[in-house]
Image: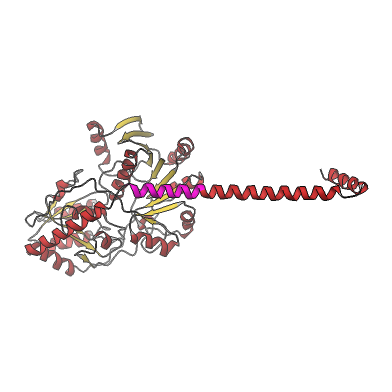
Amino acid sequence: MKILLVQSMEYLYPYGGAHKANRILMEGLAAKGHECRVISPAVSITGFEELLAAQRRSGAFEVLEDHPGEKLVILKSGVISYTIKERFKVFPFIRSMIEQFSPDITVVSEDNTHLLLETVLETRTRTIFLSHSQATLPFGPECFQEDLSKIDLYKRLDGIISVSQYLKDYFTAYAGVDSEVIYFPSYGPGPFPFLASFDNMYITAINPSAIKGFSIFIGLARRMPHLNFAAVPTWATKEDELEEMRTLPNMTILKPAENINDIYKQTKVFLMPSLWGESFGQVVVEAMLRGIPVLASHVGGLPEAKMQLDYILPVRPIRQYVKEEVLANSVPIPVIPEQELGPWVGALDRLASDRDHYESLSAASYEHANRFHASLGIEPFEAYFRKVIDKAEDRVVRLSEAVSAANEANNLQKRDMLERIQTFPSEKRERLLAMLQERR
């Protein structure tokens, strides 16, 4: 198959869950012999240009074309990726690529503005929407910005992939459209090292930020000064949040690591206190695959990612965002409800002080996560793509048959009329012929 991915995220950014999931999917499809291309507009992410330059120097990818300020084309693990630097030029580029590449399937993912999706649908290519987050959808109580008129775009799609049962239910409840649940093989090949230890140093959170429960994370660090906390800032962490964390003596700021084991081997307990509607929470599974106990919010798909193991803790989720225009690379400002730390303090205190309990939950986390991981693969995506192609081709065949049947019926009607005309007297046939010539 020829597969085109159009997304509003930088293809090579290594630290976002959706970024990593889409990249691993495309590379996995390419490894199975499919021809894969990716188009994305350039997105401003702090530190990404330096990271990209370092990857380029190390030979992590091959540069096929580099037009500064316009376009960067690279080849990595069999996938050709096009980054369009001038935002509004991405739309004609998408149209041109679809015309030239003629993909069997075009996948659109994480498009806040819906301009990419509208552009793809205009080309009438077979289109699947790959949804990682209800926040970026235009409907329902957990979206950044509601625009119910956009629901029609989703009803015109050939298919929708949801990353969790929670997200599938969200589509059904608030848009009235169905989707296919496919869990992403985003974690790399196993086996995974068992890195959990009661004696590890840190209580760790990745991407601590307002939407990810910064108020709970910083509150726990203040309330429990006898424990050592570590923060790994990524795409949503703001400078003022960094400054606040740096004021705490029991807080360490760790740099993001492409080899996530460098983080987890220092981690005793992983915190995921998100306040927004996490559709799944891949990082939860990622930590559990190393045996690390996770404290997660009871929001969105996090209980699904936790596989119902302890601890799934209550929060007051975000229900309102500052109403401003949402750009493709922006997160609107959330209104953060006041949080009750008691359940979090109790759960963390028990894990940090009870070795037997810690080791029991650690072993269960490792077992459940690795069983889940064994069920994942690229094959469900291939099967779904083929099903969409077959369904679309079946529609074309049925339409062609309907047109042929209509033409045949029309021809029969014409023959019947001619036969009837032949029975008319010659004088009547002459008058009918004269009338038809006048009409011409």
Which residue is at the front of the view, 95 or 162? 162
Q: Residue 440: name its quadrant.
A: top right
Residue 114, how many percent across, how many down? Answer: 43, 50
Give coordinates of residue 439: x percent, y percent. Answer: 83, 45
Q: Residue at x 22, y 32 (%)?
A: 58
Closer to the camera, 30 or 250?
Answer: 30
Picture coordinates of residue 424, whole percent (x, y): 88, 50
Which range of residues does the magenta coloring cover?
Answer: 378-393
263 left or right of 149 in image: left
The residue at 30%/36% (across/down) is: 77
The answer to whether any part of residue 19 appears in the image is yes
Look at the magenta stretch and give its main secondary structure. helix
User: Compared with residue 259, is residue 287 higher up or lower down, i.e. above or below?
Assistant: below
Left or right of 333? Residue 198 is: left
Report the number of numbered marks. Answer: 0
Residue 194 lies in the magenta stretch: no
- The residue under the point 39% across, 48% down is 383
Q: Position of residue 329 (x, y in %)?
A: 35, 48
Tell me: residue 92, above or below residue 425.
above
Figure quadrant of the N terminus: top left
